[in-house]
Amino acid sequence: MAERWLAARFNRPGHDLFGYRIYVICSDGDLMEGISGEAASLAGHLQLSNLVWLYDDNHISIEGSTDLAFTEDVETRFKGYGWATHHVDDANDCEAVARAIEAFQADRR
């Protein structure tokens, strides 16, 4: 939100001081917290297309397996918030992750 406000206030034709992308790396434990859902919902509502969350769905939290308390479909939740999603089957496949990031960047120019 701050980047968008700064851009609206200070950018001038031919002088874009603000226009960067923001990347977040998160996992199951992070998205189990209520505040992450509220932040993601607000970002979707405000159409913050400069924001990307890289979510590692490894089914592990501080309590152990996420099956103990977290069984929702996070990708569907984010689609409901209005986010574009790109699914990568294996987070260790660096080329697939790079392609997903490149797709995000191409969509947001």
Image (tube, helix red, strand yellow):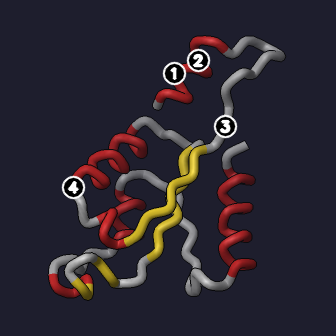
The mark nearer the N terminus, 1 or 3, is 1
Circles 2, 3 touching at the beta carbon (< 8 Å): no
Q: Which residue is mark 1?
A: 5
| Image position of 101 with respect to 91: above or below | above
- Residue positioned 44% across, 64% down in the render: 26
Residue furthest front in the image = 62
Q: Quadrant of the C terminus?
A: top right
Q: Report the amino acid beneath label 2.
A: Ala
Q: Position of residue 2 (x, y in %)?
A: 49, 27
**Disc 2 secondary structure class:** helix
Q: How many marks?
A: 4
State the CA–CA distance, disc 4 to disc 1.
25 Å
Disc 4 versus disc 3: distance between alpha carbons?
27 Å
Q: Secondary structure at mark 4?
A: helix
Residue 8 got which mark? 2
Location of residue 44 in the rendering, given as x and y in whole percent from the top left corner: 42, 45
Can you tell which quarter of the image residue 95 is in? bottom right
Amino acid at pointer 1: Trp
The Cα atoms of the two marked residues, 2 and 1, are separated by: 5 Å
Is disc 2 in contact with disc 1, using a CB cutoff of under 8 Å?
yes
Residue 55: x, y in percent? 47, 68
Categorize mark 3 by other alpha carbons within 10 Å: few (<14), some (14-19), many (20+).
Answer: few
Q: Which residue is mark 4?
A: 34
Q: Which amino acid lies under the numbered mark 4 shown in the image of this protein?
A: Gly
The residues bearing labels 2 and 3 have C-alpha atoms spaced at a distance of 13 Å
Residue contact at pointers 4 and 3, CB within 8 angstroms: no
Q: Which residue is mark 3?
A: 20
Q: Is residue 69 left or right of residue 29?
A: left
In the displayed structure, would residue 2 be above or below residue 73?
above
